[in-house]
């Protein structure tokens, strides 16, 4: 049974700090991949955490293994632009995600 997870991804060794997010290598492929995960309901929310090198994703999955497997198909994972920093089960207490 699926549940919610807060997933933090952090910049890897290939990240170029002198370039914007959209100027990083393989941006379009990464963006299309993440948009597809969102469209299918796997990634519910996501975006960079201001002032950090991290991205926060709220994901609906069965377990952490599924998250690792799905995000491993991202070109930014294989290129080491982003790597998983932390996966934590999350219990939503206020609001809803539909």
Image (cartoon, rainbow, N blue to C red):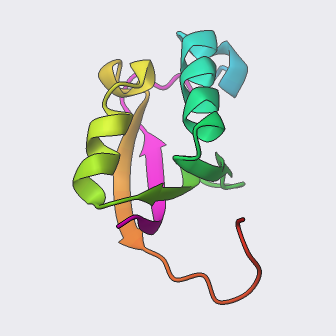
* Image location of residue 10, percent across then percent down: 45, 46
Residue at horizontal 29%, vertical 61%?
A: 63
**Along the line of sight, the residue nearer the viewer: 68 or 11:** 68
**Along the line of sight, the residue nearer the viewer: 28 or 98:** 98
The residue furthest right is 95
Q: Is residue 30 magenta?
A: no
**Along the line of sight, the residue nearer the viewer: 72 or 79:** 72
Residue at horizontal 62%, vertical 39%?
A: 38
Viewer can see residue 13: yes
* Image location of residue 7, percent across then percent down: 45, 58
Q: Which quadrant is home to the N terminus?
A: bottom left
Viewer can see residue 53: no
Magenta stretch bounds: 1-17
Check the image and report above or below for 59 versus 88: above
* Left or right: 10 in relation to 21: left
The residue furthest left is 65
* Image location of residue 33, percent across then percent down: 54, 23
Hey, which quadrant is residue 77 in on the image? top left
Residue at horizontal 72%, vertical 54%?
A: 50
The residue furthest front is 1
Q: Which quadrant is home to the C terminus?
A: bottom right
**Along the line of sight, the residue nearer the viewer: 47 or 44:** 44
Check the image and report above or below for 45 versus 70: below
* Left or right: 75 in relation to 78: right
* Image location of residue 54, percent across then percent down: 54, 50
């Amino acid at each position: 049974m699926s549940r919610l997870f807060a997933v933090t991804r952090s910049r890897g060794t290939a990240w170029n700090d002198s370039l914007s997010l959209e100027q990083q290598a393989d941006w379009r492929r990464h963006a299309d991949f993440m948009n597809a995960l969102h469209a299918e309901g796997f990634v519910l929310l996501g975006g960079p955490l201001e002032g950090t090198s991290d991205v926060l994703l709220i994901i609906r999955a069965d377990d952490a293994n599924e998250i690792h497997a799905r995000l491993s198909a991202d070109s930014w994972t294989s290129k080491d632009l982003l790597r998983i920093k932390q996966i934590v089960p999350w219990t939503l207490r206020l609001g809803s995600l539909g």
